[in-house]
Image (spheres, grey):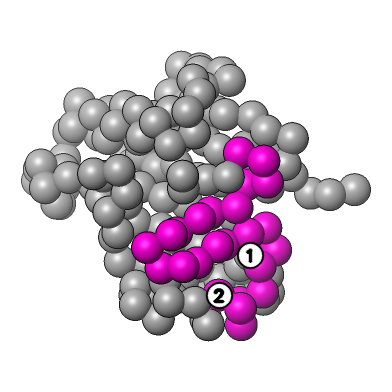
């Protein structure tokens, strides 16, 4: 299992790491996942910080993670599957290739969550969502950025 359907925790068993809602950054930095796969960080200058990690293998998929922190607490998670046939630059990019990434991401999420999407929509952008009481897991193709990605968004607790 990668995403715990009960609480939205990301379970990276190969690294003995659990990444959960509002996890403090200091706690993440203590994990084997962070120590082995941390790549770089981007300070958005709005209080948000993105931490990027090298790809790991999950269920025969190459998966990369970007963790968004608001201050020093985990805010949301973005992920993406990768294959060697994916476009490496603009010369190789086509919308058809990017839609293949979108469909692969959807297939990956259905596999790891063990359920079909709660809803799929084609407008304004192709996307699919899996809803849970704690938040949702989603996948989207965004033509503005010419990219497909997926993620975990947590509901704000009242």
2 inside magenta stretch: no
User: Residue at the spot x=62%, y=47% of the render?
Assistant: 8
Above or below 70: residue 157: above
Give whichever of discs 2 and 1 has the lower sequence position: 2
What is the x, y in percent for residue 61? 26, 44
| Secondary structure beneath label 2 | helix
Mark 2 in CB contact with mark 1 (< 8 angstroms): yes
CA gap between label 2 and label 1 equals 9 Å
Above or below 87: residue 13: below
Pointer 2 residue: 28
Pointer 1 residue: 74
156 lies left or right of 129: right
21 inside magenta stretch: yes
User: Residue at the spot x=84%, y=49% of the render?
Assistant: 157
Residue 133 lies in what quarter of the image? top right
Residue 6 lies in what quarter of the image? top right
34 lies left or right of 48: left
- Magenta-colored span: 5-28
User: Residue at the spot x=17%, y=45% of the render?
Assistant: 83
């Amino acid at each position: 299992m990668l995403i715990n359907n009960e609480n939205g925790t990301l379970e990276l068993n190969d690294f003995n790491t659990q990444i959960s809602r509002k996890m403090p950054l200091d706690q993440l930095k203590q994990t084997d996942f962070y120590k082995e796969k941390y790549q770089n960080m981007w300070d958005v200058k709005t209080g948000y910080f993105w931490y990027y990690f090298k790809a790991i293998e999950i269920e025969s998929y190459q998966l990369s993670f970007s963790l968004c922190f608001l201050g020093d607490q985990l805010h949301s998670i973005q992920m993406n599957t990768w294959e060697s046939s994916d476009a490496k630059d603009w010369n190789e990019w086509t919308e058809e290739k990017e839609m293949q990434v979108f469909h692969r991401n959807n297939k990956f999420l259905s596999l790891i969550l063990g359920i079909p999407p709660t809803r799929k929509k084609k407008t304004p952008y192709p996307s699919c969502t899996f809803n849970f009481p704690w938040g949702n897991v989603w996948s989207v193709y965004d033509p503005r950025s010419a990219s497909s990605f997926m993620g975990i968004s947590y509901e704000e607790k009242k």
